[in-house]
Amino acid sequence: MDLELAALHSIATGTAAPNHPLNPKDTTLFDVHRANHRMATADPEAIVRWAVTEFGERLALSSSFGAHSAAMLHLVTRIAPRVPIIFVDTGYLFPETYRFAEELRERFSLNLHVYSPRFTTARLEATEGKLWEQGEHAVRRYLTLNKVEPMQRALRELGVRAWLAGLRASQTEHRRSLRKVEVQDSRVKVHPILDWTTADVDAYLAEHDRPYHPLYHEGYRSIGDWHSTQPVAPDEDERAGRLLGVKRECGLHLPTTDEENQSLTSSRL
């Protein structure tokens, strides 16, 4: 069995990932510049196949089960059907999001791993109030507690070395600065559809008969927590309806250390 087939087999058969944190030396040895050179002209499917070959059972996919999430879910799982899919449940998602995630899990036999904050929404509001209404500093705390911490815990517990994410350059200023392969918090981050436009995603969903989030047809183009997401007009930016954080970033796709933030800032990002 060649290298690619072996890697595909390990994910397809659901081989358990090691339950321990990433060894930082793993990423130290990874040549991100060489990887980007190789992936510069690769299409999304080729990028996913490369990631499966390179990282095998230590590869995972994150999904918000948002407006266009079915595109990335299909793109990745058609190649690696048993890849772990990490879904961060903040406790404040729309009911439609929970039902959509369950529908896709059952319909496509997704290897779904749901991670939640370490406390209930009732406890959070009783002890700290509605953080999303208390200014930018409180919003950052909310994002850390409800999104970043569960995601980091998922990556550690699943032994993830490389993380596939459906970020697109057209979505935010930060995402426009990204490359197809990055290193974030000592893990490799792979963005197969970084160059896609919304029209590209729409075309992919239509070609493969994959559904939009139920709220998409009610004007929701980027869907997060119910308390900070609203519909947008047809001529508005799709993330204009995301009200949590001045940069319209949920926090999951930003480095968690000051050192790495400074490094990215000084080296183009």
Image: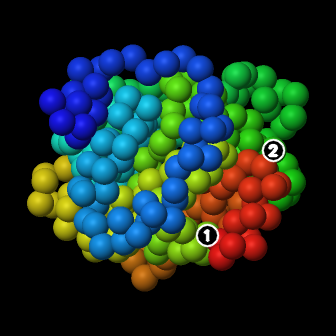
Q: Is residue 227 above or below residue 207?
A: above
Which one is in front in this view, the residue at disc 2 or the one at disc 1? 1
Q: Which mark is residue 109?
A: none
Judging from the image, the colouring scheme is rainbow
Q: Amino acid at mark 1?
A: His
Which residue is the site of mark 2? 141
Label 2 packing within 10 angstroms: few (<14), some (14-19), many (20+): some
Q: Amino acid at mark 2?
A: Arg
Q: Provide residue 32's location: percent of width, then percent of height.
A: 52, 59
Query: Mark 1: which secondary structure?
Result: helix
Q: Provide residue 223's location: percent of width, then percent of height.
A: 48, 53
Which residue is the site of mark 1? 174
CA gap, disc 2 and disc 1: 20 Å
Looking at the image, which residue is at 70% across and 66% down? 264
Looking at the image, which residue is at 62% across and 47% down? 28
Locate residue 3: give its quadrant.
top left
